[in-house]
Image (spheres, rainbow, N blue to C red):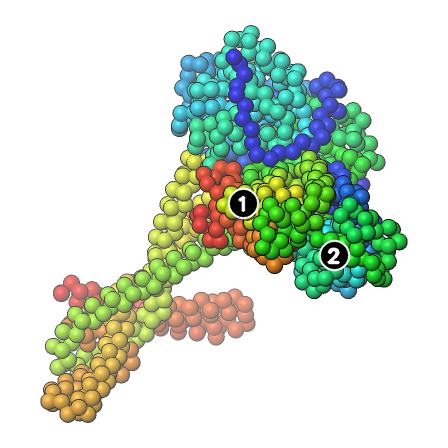
Amino acid sequence: MALLRITSPHTQRAGHRTSWVMQMVILATIPGIVVQTWLFGWGTLINLMVACVAALASEAAILAVRRRAVSFFLKDYSALLTAVLLGVALPPAVPWWVTVTAVSFAIIFAKQLYGGLGNNPFNPAMVGYAIVLVSFPVPMSQWIGVHELVASGNTLSFMQSLQAIFHQLPVIDSYTMATPLDGFKHKDLLDSETAFASLPALQAASVNSWLWVNLAYLIGGLGLIALRIITWHTPVAVLGALFVMSGVFHLVDMDQTATPWFHLTTGAAMFGAFFIATDPVSSCTSNKGKLIYGAGIGVLIYIIRAWGGYPDGVAFGVLLMNFAAPLIDYYTQPRAYGHKKAKSGLKVGGDH
Amino acid sequence: MNTAQVFSFHGGIHPEENKTQSLQLPLGRPSLPSELILPLGQHIGQSSRPVVNQGDKVLKGDVIATSNGFLSSYLHAPTSGAITAIEERPIAHPSGLSDLCIVLHPDGEDRWTELKPLNNWQSIDKAEILAYLSNMGIVGMGGAGFPTQVKLQGAQKSTLSHFIINAAECEPYITADDTLMREKTHELISGIEVFQHLIQADKVIIGIEDNKPTAITAINAVIAERNSNIQVAVVPTKYPSGGEKQLIQLLTGQEVPSGKHPADMGILCQNVGTCVAVHDAIYLGKPLISRITTLTGEALTSPQNVEVLLGTPIEHLLAYADVQHSRLNRLILGGPMMGYTLDSAAVPIVKTTNCILAASKKEFPAPAPEQACIRCGMCEQACPASLLPQQLLWFSKSQEHEKAEHYNLFDCIECGACSYVCPSSIPLVQYYRHTKSSIRDAREANVKSDLAKQRFEARKARQEAEAAEKEAKRLARQKATTAKSAEPKKAAPVADSIAPTSKTAAPASPAVDDTKKLKVDVAIGKSKLKKLQKQLLDAQENEHLEDISALQLQVTDQENLVAELEKQLAAVLESAPSVAKVPVDDAAKKAKIDAAIAKAAVKKVEKALKKAEEMQAPEVDAIRQQLKDAQQRADELEQALSSSGSVTPKATSPATPASAAELDLAGQVKKEKIAVALANAQINKLTKRLANAPEEAEAIQAEIDAAKQRLQTAQALLNTLVQSQNSTQENR
């Protein structure tokens, strides 16, 4: 009888595999998906389908080209997660080829060309998002409005959504409107108070719809923390920095800036803080590092929202901090057991 | 009052405990096996030295192997019987190693030798108790097997704030300590008291996980009954709270500084098993010959704890616990987190074996294929040493050893918590072990190359010193030569007559060189040995157990080397020819060098002259004169050199006719001696031929006679020569 020879440890925590981690993150987006579908129509779900098919197809293709075990890697659910994150981030009625471009670019260029899962320096979903945001600005800015405020007085029906996504919908303009962030960005010479009183995008119905979306992602995110898939450090740092930045500048200039509450509950604030910034592969490792990394993202989100060229800044904020993550890692080693203070910096072997 | 404050440590995991299986049955006592296999290295440090021979009869408790150095221990016969062999047997080791074992065939009588308890331990010198414990073969039974007397010696050097008794037993499945505490509570407390008598710590704390309520109650009862001031600290069940560093943090809130030992911060840790062994030794006089071991795992029908004699083969115990061989898939020595697999059940129980885990395939399925690290950070949250396992994995994979060290790889205690939680099934600990050993190898190579560099530099310095000495001698001689160069002709004939002598001296010079070299080697070897011995002493004092055995080996090697060199030196000195010839040879060398230097001087002056002529300097004439002088000196030296073949040594030093004649005489003596030897050899040869060829006897006999005659004349000549030589020497 041959006995198995293997090194310790001999047990593993049952069931908690990488695929489980990915599945849980996907599941945690469900509240957000439900709210988005409820508010903005079927487009989100159709986007998700398109994104998932595109992701699996491009992942399988590139794995085959790279001569890797296709089914083994498809089963880790990481491609699907990228697809889901992109699917909910893109506008609900965006043409299908935008979604496919974003997803396939994310999978092929941002992930697999760097060596696949675990080796990508940048968040693949955000790379895909940034690519289509820069390349196709018009469809990317057409966000479906809440039915009370849009010209047609309704959300897109399922057939209309399909038509908008796969063919063309001439009446699409009567269903879309600026998001609150977009509206606030282009308030031009109006001061804040007037803007909130007059601009359609900043009416209570519009602002509240985004509050619901953010709350839904907050719930999903708290679930991830409860499952210990993410730690509180990154989201708290992102939201905290965003709060501090918006709070300070609001105090300095009440007339031209929005409240911290507005910043925390519109756009992709919660989605970014809990689902995007927490991507472990491209973010920092230590708890201290995560705090710095998250705070950087929060600050960048505010800077881009306030003074940048785009209404929201999650994608670029995350990508910019991805660049900084390795450096932050070098300076934020935790203090190991038995050491008086933590080692830091790039200098190697300074402790001997 | 008896409960201590409990702190917490970073990370940790909660694997399924699986401890109840082995606690269903009472403590078992297996029958005597057909043979007991006792490895000589059951502890950290030098292996014990056997004191029995094959065929010897021993009684239970007799010493069969003694301590073999500072960091070593005794070994006793676990039962009465006969020694059947002292040979290599497979032992319990991660690599499936074999080692020297004493094999004992029990006679079944289990007859004790005379037991001598140390009843007066409270009144005698503590050093005596330590020596007694060493004689009883007591080593740490928690896992490492560190000889207890050595650990106590280290602890006695400083005042101790805490004496911690490790009863945490955090590994899943294992219940050996739990059982021990339930069965031998009184013995445990007595043992702790003996320790406390030896070290006098401020606080005595038993650290125990809260999953052992029965043991906790039993201990509390005994402590109350004895009115003892031992504290019991119940720590939450979390792996690896039983790790020495983690338990210290749990009970004191302090961390053991990296690279230091608990003793350095005034803390001593002992396992409960060791305390009971100390009790048995002191009060009952029983040496360490048995221990409690857990037999568990799904492949066993009746898992349980057993009190087992050291040396019992594991297969004997598996049979005792009704193993189902069809289900047995993995045989683990130790727990599931840090134990290692065995490939044979023939290996014996040793002093540190706390668990045998006979696992089925269902229980411990083969690990899932390794996936990419997604840096999820679960390992980091689980790491009790607050490391960044995901970064360490990265550096291990890319073999960036310096970075791995910078990220404190060597603070990893290999507890396996990171591997346990890793969602990508990465065998992290395996990567770290590999990287650690690569770094250790590289360090050793570095040390070696440093030594080589030192040797090289020392050699260079030596050569430079020799060159400087030569230069000084040359300068001194230069003065003499200018005086003597007037009479080189006189020296020449002397040189002629000397030639054969210096030729025969030539083979002697390498021998002389050898002697010198050997002497230097011996000196170097001795200093190195001294250094190593000092290092060893330091290591022993500071309990750097990793270094001790390596150093001990190095010291032994060095001792052997020095002894060897000394032997060689002695041999060379004996065989070396008369030292008188050394200066001759040296002188010849010196003369050659002088000639070379003189030539170089001529060249230099020529150059200077040329330059001066070019520049039309006024000192041209002076330089010309110099050149002439130099040329002359060079010519003289050259002449002397060529006229003698290898130059006459006396040309450079006062050569008196008397000494020349003496040398002449010595040459003749030598010649005659050779002639005598030749004749002798010829006679021998002829005699041999005579024996081989009796038909030519007459002719050969005649030849022998002739040779003998030659021998006689040569002998006579030699005698007269020697006489005249002696007389000239007396005359001087």
Identified at 53% across, 14% down, the residue is: B2
Residue B57 vertical placement versus A259 (above, below): above
Q: Which residue is mark 2?
A: A142
**Could you classify mark 2 by the number of other residues whose Cα lies within 10 Å: few (under 14), some (14-19), or many (20 or more)?**
many
Which three-letter amino acid code belongs to the residue tagged 2?
A: Gln
- Residue A288, position in %: x, y? 54, 43
- Residue B211, position in %: x, y? 66, 22
Q: Pick whichever, B312 or B247, lies toward us.
A: B247
Residue A299 vertical placement versus B636 (above, below): above
**Labels 1 and 2 positioned on one and the same chain:** yes
Is B562 left or right of A42, judged from the image as shown?
left
**Could you classify mark 1 by the number of other residues whose Cα lies within 10 Å: few (under 14), some (14-19), or many (20 or more)?**
some
Disc 1 to disc 2: CB gap under 8 Å = no
Is A34 left or right of B6, judged from the image as shown?
right
Task: Report which quarter residue B331 is drawn in.
Answer: top right
Q: Which residue is mark 1?
A: A254
Task: Report which quarter residue B77 is drawn in.
Answer: top right
